[in-house]
Structure formats: structure tokens, C-alpha cells
């Protein structure tokens, strides 16, 4: 097959091109995998909260990038609302804990350990918080700082024992930690402050009716049902992360297209006499274009195969070197990236094959 023979003539160039395509593919798939990991880690705490309603300050719509301050008095009013079975407080703060002399920032969630609402979504090692002297940390956070179940860390002037490790609490740039509400309130020195309340309604009660009652009867609060509040937080996560990922992915796509255009243009120039002969014997332009596209597709398919094979090992290496970076790849994501790469390949081939128009049949006899 002629396209394969052309590529075999320059094995080093072809291998470098396949490697470049593979790297671009890995970059795009890595960004998609990072997005999936961050989207899961950022909102899994909310998704698994088992709350019918979220009650927060009226100026906030989410807890990822919004500030909410309510008091215990708000909680009393919420509990008195008809249809409310339980209103569990949660206090979310950014704080620094110390492992030896090394500081680390954690998104600490203080919750009512007795009620169990607002705590870690999944415990993967050890157990949940039971006393004020215990702490649950995200598994990736603990791996990064070499913390194990049973270790003691300092939080301000207090020593807390790590009683468990959680999963689904890694938001990439920050990780969750969990302590009792009383301990978290003591950290900020205001025992009556909370971020919001997770409300469970009585069975059979219309949740939207309860939501309206709370919003109408208690001034200064916003009340969201579970699905709306989850969407609000997903929107905040995407608005802060997606533009960066799109920009990097676009750069990768431009690099890939440039690599292919340059390579195919060089191949056309080096095989100019061969193409002139084909034209002289009556080969249609579509046949010559097919040769260029075939070469581009062969290189891309080889690059995709290399990338798909290497990606799981690269992901494990990245997580080993940087435990806080979770990579959640999937076959669907690989198929999406493959489609994009093949699209760039066809476009690059179309750009490069325009050089064929400047090749004339008489060049075969020069």
C-alpha cells in the first residue's frame, strides 16, 4: 500500500509524529479525566448529603464559592416549621492543620456527629467522627502528607486523632476534612455560628411546600431543594474550571493540527515527482487526496493506540507522584477524544493536500 510505503521510508519521522499525536491525545484525555474527578469530588459531599432541603444565607447560592453565615437561632426557627423532621447544622471553613512542621489547608466540615448528617460521604479506612478530638481526612490529602489512621495532627493549639479516611471528598485544589460541629465552632471562636442547615422533611410531606414556608417565615435565608442546590454547586465548579481546561485542550488541538499539517506537507514535497507521475497517467485528484488522508489516518490511529495503551500507566504514575490529583478516565472519554483527534486529522489532511494542486503532470518528465 503506497501510503504505508511513504511512511516507512522515514521511520524516525513517523515514530516522532505518532509520539506527538499520542501526547496530544493523552493531554486531552487527561483534562477530561481531571474534570470528571473534580466534578465528582467537588459535589459528592452535597450529592450524598441525604438532605431534602438546604437552608443557607440569602446572599449565597452554593457552598463551593459562596459565603453563608447563619446562627443557631435560625435552626430553631427551621425546626419549628411544619413538615420539618430534622434540621442538622453544618459549618464549613478553610483552616490549616499541621503534621509536624508542615502546614496543610483543608476545607473543614463541622457536623453533628450524633445525627450523622453532613459528614463524610464514604469512609474507606477507619471510622467516622465520634468525639471532639477526632478528625476524618480525605484519602488523597492523607496520602499527600503521609497521614494514616491513628496519627495525630494539630489544629490550632489542639491535637486531633485521625480516626478515618474518606472518599469522594477531593476537589483537586482543596480537600475536605470532617470534625464535630462543636470543635469546628471552637476554631473560629463563635459557638453559635453555622454555614447552613440540612433539612429532612416528614414522610409524605410536600417538600416544595416546606421550602416555601421556611423561605417566607424566616428572614435572611435562601432555601434550595437538593437537586437545585446540587446544580448550583456544579455550575460554580464548571464556571471556575472549564474555561481553563478548554483553553489547554484547544492548545493541544492546535499543536496536533500543526504537527500533522507540517508532516503531510513535507511528505507531499518529498513525493512530488511520484504525484506528478500519477497525474501524468491519469490519476484523479481524489485519488491523490485519498493518499494524503490515508497517511494522516494511519498516523493518528497509531498515536491513539499508543495513547490508550499508555494512559492507565501514566494515570497511576501521576496519582503516585501527586496523590491529590485524581484521574478518572473512561472508555467513553477515550472515544470522545478519539473523535476529536480524527476530526483534526481530516482537517489537517485537507489543508496539506492543497499543495497537490501546484503539482503538474509535466513535472514527471523534468
Image (cartoon, rainbow, N blue to C red):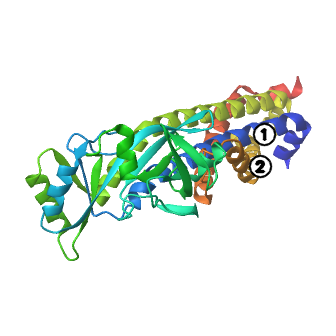
**Helix, strand or loop status at disc 2:** helix
Q: Secondary structure at mark 1?
A: helix
Q: Which residue is located at x 78 percent, y 28 percent?
A: 266
Counting residues from the start of the chain, the first of labels 2 and 1 encountered is 1
Judging by the rendered image, the residue that carries numbered circle 1 is 19
Q: Residues within 10 Å of mark 1 (few under 14, many from 20)?
A: some
Q: Is residue 262 visible?
A: yes
Q: How many marks?
A: 2
Disc 2: CA contacts within 10 A as few (<14), some (14-19) or many (>=20): some
Coordinates of residue 7 in the picture (x, y in percent)? 85, 40
Classify residue 155 as left or right of residue 84. Answer: right
Are circles 2 and 1 on residues that touch, CB within 8 Å?
yes
Quarter of the figure with the C terminus: top right
Q: In the image, 189: left or right of 146?
A: left
* Residue at 65% in and 31% down: 255
Give the x, y percent position of residue 276. 81, 32
- Identify residue for label 2: 306
Q: Which of the numbered marks, if any, corresponds to residue 199?
A: none
Image quadrant where residue 115 sits:
bottom left
Residue 68: x and y in percent read 28, 42
Where residue 227 sits: x, y (%)? 31, 59
Determine if residue 236 is in view: no
Compare residues 170 and 165 and report the one nearer the observer. Answer: 165
Q: CA distance from mark 2 to mark 1?
A: 8 Å
Q: Is residue 33 above or below residue 163?
A: above
Q: Residue at x 63, y 50 (%)?
A: 338
Amino acid at each position: 500500500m503506497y501510503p504505508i510505503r511513504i511512511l516507512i521510508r522515514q521511520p524516525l519521522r513517523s515514530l516522532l509524529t505518532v509520539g506527538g499525536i499520542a501526547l496530544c491525545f493523552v493531554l486531552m484525555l487527561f483534562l477530561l479525566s481531571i474534570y470528571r474527578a473534580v466534578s465528582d469530588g467537588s459535589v459528592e459531599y452535597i450529592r450524598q448529603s441525604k438532605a431534602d432541603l438546604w437552608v443557607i444565607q440569602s446572599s449565597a447560592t452554593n457552598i463551593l464559592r459562596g459565603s453563608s453565615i447563619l446562627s443557631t437561632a435560625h435552626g430553631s426557627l427551621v425546626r419549628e416549621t411544619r413538615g420539618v423532621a430534622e434540621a442538622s447544622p453544618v459549618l464549613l471553613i478553610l483552616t490549616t492543620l499541621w503534621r509536624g512542621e508542615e502546614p496543610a489547608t483543608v476545607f473543614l466540615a463541622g457536623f453533628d456527629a450524633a445525627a450523622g448528617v453532613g459528614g463524610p460521604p464514604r469512609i474507606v479506612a477507619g471510622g467516622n467522627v465520634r468525639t471532639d478530638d477526632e478528625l476524618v481526612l480525605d484519602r488523597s490529602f492523607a496520602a499527600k502528607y503521609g497521614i494514616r489512621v491513628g496519627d495525630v495532627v494539630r489544629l490550632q493549639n489542639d491535637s486531633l486523632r485521625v480516626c478515618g479516611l474518606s472518599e469522594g471528598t477531593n476537589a483537586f485544589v482543596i480537600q475536605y476534612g470532617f470534625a464535630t460541629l462543636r470543635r469546628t465552632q471552637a476554631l473560629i471562636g463563635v459557638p453559635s455560628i453555622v454555614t447552613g442547615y440540612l433539612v429532612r422533611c416528614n414522610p409524605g410531606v410536600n417538600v416544595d411546600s416546606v421550602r416555601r414556608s421556611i423561605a417566607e417565615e424566616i428572614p435572611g435565608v435562601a432555601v434550595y431543594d437538593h437537586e437545585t442546590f446540587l446544580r448550583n454547586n456544579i455550575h460554580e465548579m464548571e464556571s471556575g474550571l472549564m474555561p481553563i481546561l478548554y483553553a489547554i485542550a484547544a492548545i493541544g488541538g492546535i499543536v496536533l493540527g500543526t504537527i500533522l499539517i507540517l508532516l503531510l506537507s513535507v511528505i507531499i514535497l518529498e513525493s512530488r515527482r511520484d504525484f506528478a507521475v500519477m497525474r501524468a497517467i491519469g490519476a484523479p485528484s481524489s485519488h491523490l487526496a485519498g493518499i494524503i488522508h490515508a497517511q494522516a489516518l494511519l498516523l493518528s490511529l497509531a498515536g491513539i493506540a499508543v495513547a490508550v495503551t499508555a494512559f492507565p500507566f501514566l494515570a497511576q504514575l501521576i496519582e503516585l507522584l501527586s496523590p491529590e490529583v485524581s484521574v478518572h478516565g473512561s472508555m467513553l472519554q477515550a472515544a470522545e477524544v478519539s473523535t476529536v483527534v480524527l476530526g483534526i486529522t481530516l482537517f489537517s489532511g485537507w489543508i496539506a493536500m492543497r499543495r497537490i494542486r501546484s503539482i503538474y503532470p509535466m513535472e514527471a518528465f523534468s
